[in-house]
Amino acid sequence: MIHQLDQILTQTALHYPQKLALDDNKKQLSYQNLESMVSQLADNFIRLGLSVGSRIGIYLPKQIEAVATKFAASRAGLVFVPINPLLKPHQVSYILQDCNVELLVTSGPRSKQLSEIYSDCNELKQLVLLDEKYDASLIASLNVQIWAELLSTPSDQTQSRNRIDQDLAAILYTSGSTGNPKGVCLSHRNLIAGAQSVCHYLENTKEDIILAVLPLSFDYGLSQVTTGLLVGATVVLMEYLLPRDVIRQVEKHQITGLAAVPPLWFQLAQLDWPDSCKKSLRYITNSGGAMPKATLQHLRGHLPNTKPYLMYGLTEAFRSTYLEPSEIDKRSDSIGKAIPNAEILVCRPDGSECDAGEIGELVHRGVHVSLGYWNAPEKTAIRFKPVAANSNYIPELAVWSGDQVRRDNDGFLYFIGRADDMIKCSGYRISPSELEDTLFLMQGIKEVAALGIKDDQLGQAVALIIITDGSIDEAAIKKYCMKQLPNYMQPKYIELVDKLPRNPNGKIHRNQLKDQFAQLANKNH
């Protein structure tokens, strides 16, 4: 019985020890060798003095070491915190401080980039570096371990710690509609059940070769790994620069499964696909926003033998719905029905269920519902609530998504829109206030409002509406953003204005602002 995330790997390694588990285009590991690496790494985490439940951060691109660290954390009874490698130092600092990370796994060059934040992270005591390309003077306050030395340390007896499936396994940070990102707390059960559910409806087997192109800090990206390793598939980890690189990887590795977000699918739909890809690619999946119909049509034209799965998910519940490929021609604008072992409700504010055709909030109940937000009880109470009160037993908490949907007479769901002001760009959820807080640190900025503008490629593009003191111009603001914000947060539009519309309470009137600048979608850039 699997009740701890790392047991996924142990079970598969018993059945397929010599089968290729991971390939990051630099190194390859069999299931047996990956299992050995995870055990030795877990043993060393325990020997370094990390207690049960301690958080360890992972600030790496998609590579074998990043995956091994996650499973080793599970085996050592720790909680892994994957950090998007695109984040800038001050954003990394917030995450490290928010969940009191004690150990950070990263590379030597990345450790230099983070040197300015170490003094602010009081709980951070140790670094595990993948290489020796670091400046010791910049990290003198930390205990530094080198990856290769950890794995070469002999051990008389491998240590591990048993946890139950409801224990905390991971914290994934996702932007909220206000303030800094929130840490979504995922149990071992959440991660295992999610992998089991997805591999069931995608019909994954040990014959699959899955290409992982999404960040492992995303639940959607992490899912490619957990799902693949559960069934004995091979997972190819890839950092791509150009969309054509993705197609080359599909061809090189004879990929059978590929997941992406709409902006990447838009780009891939514009390219030619070799015949070998058309033969190998069994399925593609989309989440992180609706895929435009034209994009889907182009992809189906390129890949006539490939099944497309359209999905909807939220980090707070891993995955919620999927549309069977056989239904796409009938209802390509639907997000489908609930994934296995989940119930999706459409509810009014009082918790009662909406009638067919009535718009309400998507509410997810079941085993995939996470443990809430780290260190944020008030935000947890808003999002995690009972569907309806029941006095006969302890009420079950469900996730109220904040998304408006409707259900048709056949039970299929349709996404209507977000109930908050989140910007959904390239599959990322971006908090307007996080953008605004960063811009306010620039001298010359008096006021700023961040908006999402409809964009065929990105889903939504970031627009910054700014009042300055006259000492800076658009070029200076762009330069500042390039330095302070990750690529996916970069504004497509910067508009300098004299005033911002306000509501009676004196706050920025965001709906009015959206209406005022909606025409930016037609602006020729």
Image: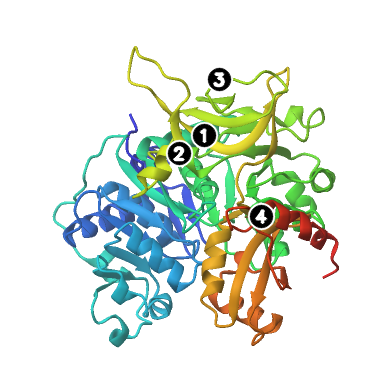
Q: How far apart, in angstroms, are the residues tagged by discs 3 and 2?
A: 17 Å
Q: Identify the disc placed on residue 400.
A: 1
The residue type indicated by label 4 comes to Arg
Name which of mark 1 and mark 2 comes first in the sequence.
2
Q: Secondary structure at mark 3?
A: loop
Image point (72%, 68%), residue name: 492
Q: Identify the disc placed on residue 510.
A: 4
Q: Which residue is mark 2?
A: 382
Foreground mark, 2 or 4, reads 4
Q: Secondary structure at mark 4?
A: helix
Q: Image quadrant of residue 355?
A: top right
Name which of mark 1 and mark 3 comes first in the sequence.
3
Q: Quadrant of the N terminus?
A: top left
Q: Image quadrant of residue 42?
A: bottom left
Residue 416 locus on image (x, y percent): 70, 37
In this view, the residue in front, 10 or 410, is 410
Q: Badge 2: few (under 14), some or many (20 or more) residues near its Cα, within 10 Å?
A: few
Q: How far apart, in angstroms, are the residues tagged by discs 1 and 3?
A: 13 Å
Q: Badge 4: few (under 14), some or many (20 or more) residues near its Cα, within 10 Å?
A: some
Q: Are marks 4 and 3 in contact (CB under 8 Å)?
A: no
For the question of whether residue 86 can be seen, the reply is no
Q: How far apart, in angstroms, are the residues tagged by discs 4 and 3?
A: 30 Å
In this view, the residue in front, 166 or 445, is 445
Q: Which residue is mark 3?
A: 352
